[in-house]
Image: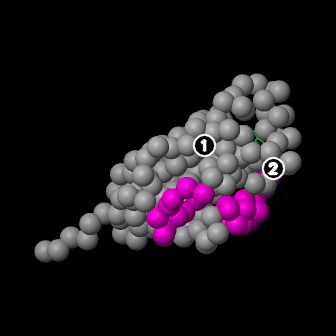
Amino acid sequence: MILAAMPKVMIVYYSRTGTTRKLAEALAGRLNADVVEIRCDRYKGGIFRYLRAGYDSVKGNLPPIKMPETDLTAYDLVLLGAPIWTSYPALPLRAFLAAKPDLPGRVGMFLTSGGHSPQEKAVAEAEALLNAPLAATLAVQEKDVKEGNFSDAMVGFVEEVVPGGGAA
Ligand SMILES: Cc1cc2nc3c(=O)[nH]c(=O)nc-3n(C[C@H](O)[C@H](O)[C@H](O)COP(=O)(O)O)c2cc1C
């Protein structure tokens, strides 16, 4: 019997308060993926950092970030994760994409949000920065991530990016 090799998947994500991290870790478990976090100190902390994030996001002020050092082209698929900020992907992910990292041909994206913004604007922004369409997208509301109520959406997304490939 010939078994199709599982694609090598890398998850690159940013999370300010842990919600997107929880989704990233669930996806990694499902896809047996490697994970790397985009680090950005500028928005760590309380209300003033929150307000700064909102202001910078509207203005498009990209923050300094710590770029992942892994060779992402060694993967078949990269999944990018971020919260939605002012309808766009959070600035640290925008900064990552603006740095024009070398990526494989297939890139998907997952987003978390407070629930008051649809994903379209964030997806369009990511595709513009990538200069390529995303293979698949997933958007989950923060409260559903926190309550662990995202398994159906996640399984659908995994099936799109790796047909028949997600661990049960
Ligand atoms: C600066 C800022 C702007 C935000 N803007 C939006 C928004 O436009 N629409 C929305 O639905 N949620 C918005 N949110 C809520 C986050 O998307 C949501 O809390 C997210 O799940 C947080 O993810 P994290 O815990 O991984 O940082 C915003 C949060 C922040 C900090």
Where residue 127 sits in the image (x, y, percent)?
66, 66
**Label 1 – label 2 distance at C-alpha:** 17 Å
Between 118 and 56, which is closer to the camera in this rendering? 56
Other residues around mark 2 within 10 Å, as few (<14) / some (14–19) / many (≥20): few
Res. 39 image quadrant: top right
The residue pinned by badge 1 equals: 14
Residue 91 shown in magenta: no
Label 1 CB, ligand 1: below 8 Å? yes
Where residue 141 sits in the image (x, y, percent)?
67, 50
Between 121 and 72, which is closer to the camera in this rendering? 72
Is residue 124 shown above or below 26? below
The residue pinned by badge 2 equals: 60
Label 1–label 2 contact, CB within 8 A = no
What is the quadrant of the C terminus in the image? bottom left
Q: Residue at x 60, y 43 (%)?
A: 14
Q: Residue at x 73, y 62 (%)?
A: 125
**Segment colored magenta:** 100-129
Residue 121 shown in magenta: yes
Which quarter is ligand 1 in? top right
**Labelled disc at residue 44:** none
Q: Quick one: label 1 or label 2, which is nearer the N terminus?
A: 1
What is the quadrant of the N terminus in the image? bottom left
Number of on-image labels = 2
Res. 15 image quadrant: top right
In this picture, residue 164 sits left or right of residue 67: left
